[in-house]
Amino acid sequence: MQGKELALTIAGVALDKQAQSLEIIDVSGKVDYTSYLVICSARSERHVESLIVAVEKALKEKGIHPLGVEGRQANQWVLMDYDDAIFHVFEDRRRGFYDLDSLWIDAERVPLRQAAGA
């Protein structure tokens, strides 16, 4: 599983766990380290953890493991690197501070309806 399919799978799992303000951003051709960013907010540090665990479990069942995970100790901003897709989960108050959405304002967004049932 690569690229868009991977990003949609991550988004589908996160949405099933009540992720908020989820965006899939297509950065292919704009950076050389990934093709898609999946960014969402969580209500609390505990919610961040539940989103990370759910995505990790769902992808592990498909034989997909992250290349790296950053920020899990604090659970305020966790990044999971799946090569073709990077999953960012922000505790709600942190997302606006880092404002990754605006950094990629010119990048195409993948419609979330494609993530339903992923």
Image (cartoon, rainbow, N blue to C red):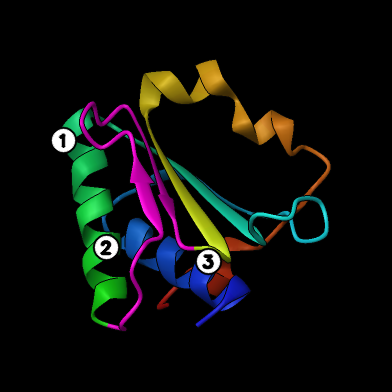
Q: Which residue is mark 1?
A: 46
- Residue type at mark 3 is Ala
Distance from Cα at disc 3 to Cα at disc 2: 13 Å
Distance from Cα at disc 3 to Cα at disc 1: 23 Å
Indicate whether 25 appears above or below 114.
above
Q: Which residue is mark 2?
A: 56
Left or right: 118 as drawn, with respect to 101: left
Indicate whether 34 appears above or below 50.
below
Q: Earlier in the sequence, mark 3 or mark 2?
A: 3
Secondary structure under tag 2 reads: helix
Q: Residues in magenta?
A: 62-82
**Dot in front, 3 or 2:** 2
Q: Quadrant of residue 71?
A: top left
Q: Which residue is mark 3?
A: 7
Secondary structure under tag 1 reads: helix
Q: Earlier in the sequence, mark 3 or mark 1?
A: 3
- The foreground one among 83 and 17 is 83
Characterize the local packing of mark 2: few (<14), some (14-19) or many (20 or more) Cα atoms within 10 angstroms: some
Indicate yes or no whether the magenta region holds residue 7. no
Characterize the local packing of mark 3: few (<14), some (14-19) or many (20 or more) Cα atoms within 10 angstroms: many
